[in-house]
Amino acid sequence: MSDSNSQNDEFLEPKRKECKIEHKDENGVSDSQLELKDFVLEKILNSSTNRKTVCVLGKFKDKSGVAIVFLEKNAFREEDLDNKGYFSVNTELKKFFQNDIYGNFECFPPASINGVKTTIIYPATDKHIAKFSQQQVHIVLETPELYDKLTLPHLEKEQFNLQWVYNILEGTSEQDRIVHDNKCEREGFVLLPDLKWDGVTTETLYLLAIVRQRGIKSLRDLDETHLPLLRRIRDEGKKKILEKYNVAGSQLRIYLHYQPSFYHLHVHFTYLKHEAPGIYAEKSHLLDTVIDNIEMIGDYYKKATLPFTIREMDNIFNIYETNGHVQRIKQENIELIDK
Amino acid sequence: MSDSNSQNDEFLEPKRKECKIEHKDENGVSDSQLELKDFVLEKILNSSTNRKTVCVLGKFKDKSGVAIVFLEKNAFREEDLDNKGYFSVNTELKKFFQNDIYGNFECFPPASINGVKTTIIYPATDKHIAKFSQQQVHIVLETPELYDKLTLPHLEKEQFNLQWVYNILEGTSEQDRIVHDNKCEREGFVLLPDLKWDGVTTETLYLLAIVRQRGIKSLRDLDETHLPLLRRIRDEGKKKILEKYNVAGSQLRIYLHYQPSFYHLHVHFTYLKHEAPGIYAEKSHLLDTVIDNIEMIGDYYKKATLPFTIREMDNIFNIYETNGHVQRIKQENIELIDK
């Protein structure tokens, strides 16, 4: 169970089965001998100055095929913040300027405590390259008419497989992970940790509530008949999370995605301070606001224009593009922001 | 002009004037001799594993007073991604595991290309410590009644100074920065780069539209009489940004904050891929959704319950706490997530 369909996910797990490739090169040299000094960069596929990541495409000298190297600076570890680590004689300090009590510097800690998470995919396929390349993202305004005409037929055609959801609801998978189970067929739901969460660390708390009622695809399908269900998810969800994880309801971000990554109604619970993927205003709708909107207008979500984001690689982009609702951006070479 | 009142801002510029302190210690040693090896950590004030930052409190050996040290891993620079930098013999590669074409490693580049941005505040005051400490954040649900009873009297009492806004509108400040100026008193607005933006880099594009009409404090004051103004901001704003910066309207996130950081109506324009501060669902309201809501219900924003986030250090927190709408969290020592 993973709900990571977000522009924010920088390192999506590739589908391993699809890409199985012989991993010896023409000289019969095993990948285990890959060395960074042999890597020749061809192109920067993506980068984030915010998260300190970069993803590059290139080749290894004397090896056939291309490789993707994904680098991410490690976060600080508490045990290195002492006089053997960052605050040691081995950390050089270079001053930029000092003004009154404020000083700006760059420091250079010993290499051994300043590692970089490194992922190498070799040989990489075109699918890998597309997956890791920066994608142009657009906002589309989905009126109720466009939902009926373009989005809904697309959803029906794609026929997303929801068997994994039914397995959870029917008790055949992930039962040991369930935090709360309200078995009412109409207003019940299952609450369990999202796969992205370790189930322990409060700072990154992330649970999903999956409704038992089938056939509610998304926000678009909600009306006043669903108010008891929505209020129950909010209230029981908060109560259980307080009991089990000791996090107050006022410190939870409770929301629905539009578009969701799977079309069986579910609600996200994340710790308010956690910058989880997909919590931006163009993608997330707070459950409290959803309830309030439906209380004001019973068929709010049948009448509203709902914005959503699409990447140019998404199938639905083509549908909106063909119908003249969004235009592709002329792709140029992507360069690092700092250049 | 800065609009950075966000839980996301990790390094707010302190108010320099307020904190002027003699910067020689009791032995008359100048701060310029601060050395990291002399720093003794007392407490981690804040950290982000996402952005690779940590902010610590401590002392310098043989110096009086406390110091704050803020560390942030540098983003990758394009010029280091070659066979003299990351991909050189000097970068050690340690393997975690290799599975088929996927390899997970940690690499240790030479210290000289793997610097850490370092800011030292010494001596630091209690105000600095409060400012840099992790704050508990809560969501409050503001009904129209609570707005009238608690929020509005607070705003009126605080009497935020808007002179800098009027200076821009009246042409006495920042005139060289203005990108677009519609001088209509009722439906006009000024569009200019936000102070957080360098005005050049598309990837971090950030502009503000400030309305000419005075007295519209926030989202709460909007109704159907403002629709022409709101549509004009959206349409002219998109047009000017396309002309001047070559960014398509479908690639812009156009939104209002609630609560805003100043109470004179303004609209944010950011590049959709830019993870700007304060773009989360609990804080940002897309202008298209605002317009759509008012089109459906003229007085939507007088009737809606609007969620907003508050930090325990905010004055308004005390007001909501005293009235029983939110509870303070028992503060414990903050530890790094990775521990």
Image (cartoon, coloured by chain):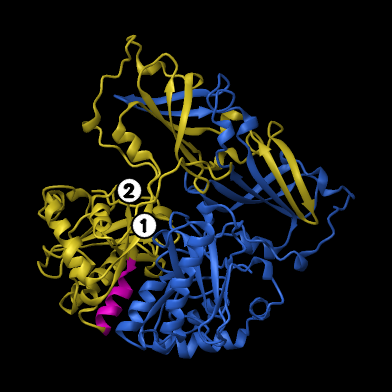
Chain colours: A blue, B yellow
- Three-letter code for the amino acid on which mark 2 is drawn: Lys
The residue most toward the right is A28
Residue for badge 2: B196
B248 vs B124, nearest the viewer? B124
Q: Secondary structure at mark 1?
A: strand
Q: Provide the chain ID for the residue under circle 1.
A: B
Q: In the rendered structure, which disc, 1 or 2, sits on the residue that comes first in sequence?
A: 1
The answer to whether residue A20 is left or right of residue A268 is: right
Residue at screen point 46% across, 90% down: A148
**How many numbered discs?**
2
Tell me, yes or no, whether the highlighted magenta stretch contains residue B315: no
Residue B289 in the magenta stretch? The answer is yes
Quadrant showing the C terminus of chain B: top right
Give the residue displayed 31% in from the left and 86% down from the top: A297
Residue A329 visible to an observer of this rendering: no
Mark identifier at residue B138: 1
- Coordinates of residue A307 in the picture (x, y in percent): 40, 75
Q: Position of residue A120 (x, y in %)?
A: 71, 50
Q: Position of residue A244 (x, y in %)?
A: 54, 60
> Seen from this angle, which residue lies furthest top?
B27
- Three-letter amino acid code of the residue under disc 1: His
Residues in magenta, as a range: B285-296
Residue sitting at x 68%, y 65%: A127
Frontmost residue, B189 versus A265:
A265
- How far apart marks 1 and 2 lie (CA) works out to 25 Å
Q: Dot 1 surroundings within 10 Å: few (below 14), some, or many (20 or more)?
A: many
Mark 2: give few (<14), some (14-19) or many (20+) Cα within 10 Å.
some
- Residue A299 sits in which quadrant? bottom left
